[in-house]
Amino acid sequence: MTIEQARREFPHTMSDMVYLNHAAVAPLSFRVRDAVDRYQTRRALKGIEPYPWIMKTVQETRELLAQMLHARADQMAFVLNTSDGLNILAQGIAWKPGDRVLLNDLEFPANVYPFLNLQRQGVEVDVIRTKDAKVTKDEIAENLTEKTKLVSLSHVQFATGAKADLTAIGKLCRERDILFAVDAIQSLPHSEIDVQRDNIDFLSSGSHKWMMADTGAAFIYAGDRALERIHQASLGWTSIDDPFDFTLRPDELRTGAARFENGTLNFAGITALNASLKFFFEFGLKEIERNVLDLSGYLINRLQQRGVEVITPKDERERAGIVSFNFPDAEKVFERLHKQNIIISLRQGRLRVSPHFYNTEEELRKLMVGLFE
């Protein structure tokens, strides 16, 4: 599939809009819209009760997610959002007073509040004071203690665009027998994650940003070590093996991560995610990653040529799709670009641009003209 073919899948590209804000909320493709329309139409007609026919799509989506992460389908589960998934981890561990969680000062609140909430149980939360807008293995190593039970980290930081070395950090955590959790909402599907290679125990991600699906449909990966250590903090009727046997059997939990799905799922949202994943696999995950890196690298080079202070690392091993930079009168420039139908973000006083695989250098050139006019 060519870029031109991929662009035809997105209705907004047929207008004058230049959409470069996938780190916030992504547009929907025709494929996703049509898949959800078919689901809703079937629900409105003869398929009013979806369980007999939708579970095939649910299982297929688990398998696609597992393929993307180099995991097993039984290690995948669906949740509402990234925070919802991380709360399964935070509330499921049998903490003791004095146990410690290690975070950093770059994190989006979704990867902070679930762990700050543990302070009520006597859990200590340590925060790395980062340098150079990124989190490194050495900084994590320096801040680990004998009481550290969990390290939780965004693969790509929302405000700086810096990408962490999951392989090195995961190895460090495994050697210390520390659980390693990853917030992947700013890195999937355009940055490869191999949960086995990277020694990731738990991962959570929404699907309305780079995954290009919809809100309210997220997913988790729970590795075998995490499954052994997470207790069932909340319990619902679909947490139980053979849930359509309605006898009360609270001890007969489903095997794998699906035991954390406490009730009826967001089937429309999972349908959207299914269609988006199939689109990504058809285009090619490696091709998506290459395109995103090329676009973010192109933008960084153009900005630096104009003397702009770019916060995001230039080395493509340390970045993904987000490019964050300081700019004079950033708020006014942001508003001016918005009026020109060039959509980016304003985050922490900086401009943030997040092109996806189907964007083009021509669109980035339009952005540059808008920035410096």
Image (cartoon, rainbow, N blue to C red):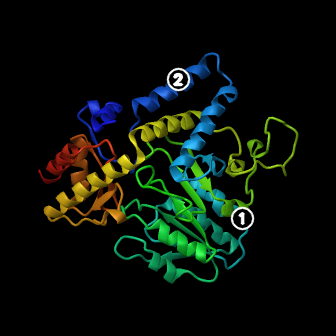
Q: Would you place residue 204 above or below residue 343 in this image?
A: below
Q: In this picture, is 84 found above or below 43?
A: below
In the rendering, at what x and y percent does residue 260 appear?
A: 69, 50
Considering every residue shown, the one lying at the far top of the view is: 45
Give the percent coordinates (x, y) of residue 361.
21, 46
Q: Depth check: 262 or 299 in front? A: 299
Which of the numbered marks, if any, corresponds to residue 127? none
Tell me: 78 left or right of 238. Answer: left
State the SS at label 2. Answer: helix
The residue that label 2 is drawn on is: 38
Q: Residues within 10 Å of mark 2 (few under 14, many from 20)?
A: some
Q: Earlier in the sequence, mark 1 or mark 2?
A: 2
Residue at 49% over, 67% down: 167
Q: Residue at x 17, y 52 (%)?
A: 371
**Left-right relation of 346 to 195:** left
Q: Is residue 111 visible?
A: yes
Give above or below for 287 relative to 328: above
Element marked by disc 1: helix
Which three-letter amino acid code belongs to the residue tagged 1? Arg
Image quarter where the N terminus lies is: top left
The residue singled out by tag 1 in the image is: 229
Instruction: Classify 10 Å Cα crowding around label 1: few (below 14), some (14-19), many (20 and above).
Output: few
Give 335 or 303, whichever is nearer the viewer.
303
Q: Tell whether label 2 touches label 1 (CB within 8 Å).
A: no
Q: Residue at x 31, y 49 (%)?
A: 291
As drawn, is 63 to the left or to the right of 188?
Answer: right
Q: What residue is drawn where x is 41% and y is 35%?
A: 28
* Label 1, label 2: how far apart the Cα atoms are: 40 Å
Instruction: Determine which quarter of the picture holds residue 201.
Output: bottom right
